[in-house]
Amino acid sequence: MALQDTRPRVTRRESLLTVAFASWLIVGLFVDGWAHNDDRPESFFTPWHGMFYSGFAASALWMLVIVQRRQADGATGLGAVPIGYGLGLVGVAVFASGGAFDMAWHELFGVEVGLEALLSPSHLVLFCGALLLITSPLRAAWSDGHSHAPTLQQLVPALLSMTLATASVAFLFMSISPSLTDAMTSSPYRFIAETFAARPGVASWMTEAVQLEGYAAILLTTIILVGPILLLARRWVLPFGTMTLLLGVVSASVAAIDSFDMGLTFVSAPLAGLAGDVLYRRLRPTRRGPQTLWAVGASVPTVMWLSYFAILALFMDVGWPAELWAGATAMSALTGFGLALLVHAPTPPQPADDPSGSWRTSGHS
């Protein structure tokens, strides 16, 4: 019998505690990001670094406690590692080595700022280790075949695990996040006009560069936020509120890094999540095929970016012409639809000469 069939499973309480300690770690990450953006004193030994690394220490200790409990029950070796938590323990080792690497890197090269901080090799090692650790509850729930239509309460450990993972990825790409950049407002254009008034050709080129930044931010953010929702929907029948919670937490967390400088624009994500929850609830009883995911994949980014630009128009200023913001919204819908096709593609027809369907398990699917 395969090792995975005999390994123990974590309890619901243990999964919730894993998520709680992982949340400590990720909140520390975002506080550290806020400190960087707020020009706080930079060194390796700071309160925000302390929050980040203490969150890791608590998470790592808890992972070891879980294994020790299984050993006390008589399990040995890998058999004491609960299903879904093996890669989490690998993540603990990766993160620990990344922490030592990070301290040495800062001592040698100083503390990075801006994009350099996000792409620092030591920080990427930390990111990979943290991602493996915080997704342990998601992997554990994913492999449990007993519940395909959970309530929101039952799905909470897996949902929060996915939410933390999504927030971590969004953090990594925060330099072009629409919640942090003003590339969609008129302020860059006023700056360009004042700075390059005597050189209209340069001003035109700079304007297009800013527009491209905003367009890339929209498409990348669509992938980061919509992809996890579609993945969850591929595995479970999602309870109402799933999309609203995930998109709301991630969007607010990213916006908080810059102290909500872009105003209420972060609200567009939970509004899109609510629209997705309503659409999914209405379609699921009568359409259980991939069409439901296709509809969600296209509609969520549409609502998100239309509401985003509406909020900009109400409270700030939309620096884009209608053709640009409408076209970018349409492209985001196509991007979400494409993601849904990848996550839940139509079932290929079964060959007439193979009624048993064995071709699907022979490397052709």
Image (cartoon, rainbow, N blue to C red):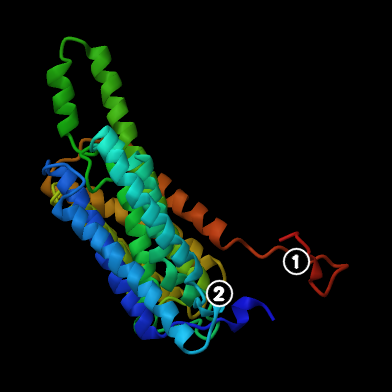
Q: If you read the primary sequence from the N terminus, does the residue marked by circle 2 or circle 1 appear first? A: 2
Q: Nearer the viewer, residue 160 or 67?
A: 67
**Figure disc tally:** 2
Residue shown at 33% from the left, 51% from the top? 99
**Quadrant of the drawing holding the N terminus:** bottom right
Residue type indicated by callout 2: Leu
Q: Answer with left or right where residue 75 lies relative to residue 23.
A: right
Residue 299 placed where, x, y %? 40, 59
Q: Secondary structure at mark 1?
A: helix
In the depicted structure, whether residue 181 falls above or below residue 267: above
Q: Residues within 10 Å of mark 1 (few under 14, many from 20)?
A: few
Indicate the position of residue 97 as horizontal and vertical percent values: 39, 52
Q: Which label sits on residue 78?
A: 2
318 relative to 200, above or below = below
Residue matched to label 1? 360
Is residue 222 in sight in this rendering? Answer: no
Quarter-of-image position of residue 342: bottom right
**SS at mark 2 in the image:** helix
Work out which residue is located at the far bottom of the displayed protein and give it.
73
Amino acid type shown at disc 1: Arg
Of badges 2 and 1, nearer the viewer stands: 2
Task: Please name whichever residue, 109 or 279, is drawn nearer the observer in this view of the structure.
Answer: 109
Q: Are marks 2 and 1 in contact (CB under 8 Å)?
A: no
Q: Quadrant of residue 187?
A: top left
Disc 2/disc 1 C-alpha distance (Å): 31 Å
86 on left or right of 300: right
Q: Furthest residue to the right? A: 353
Q: Residue at x 52, y 76 (%)?
A: 83
Q: Residue at x 85, y 67 (%)?
A: 352
Quadrant for the C terminus, please: bottom right
Residue 2 pos. (x, y %):
67, 77
- At x 39% / y 84%, what residue is drawn? 12
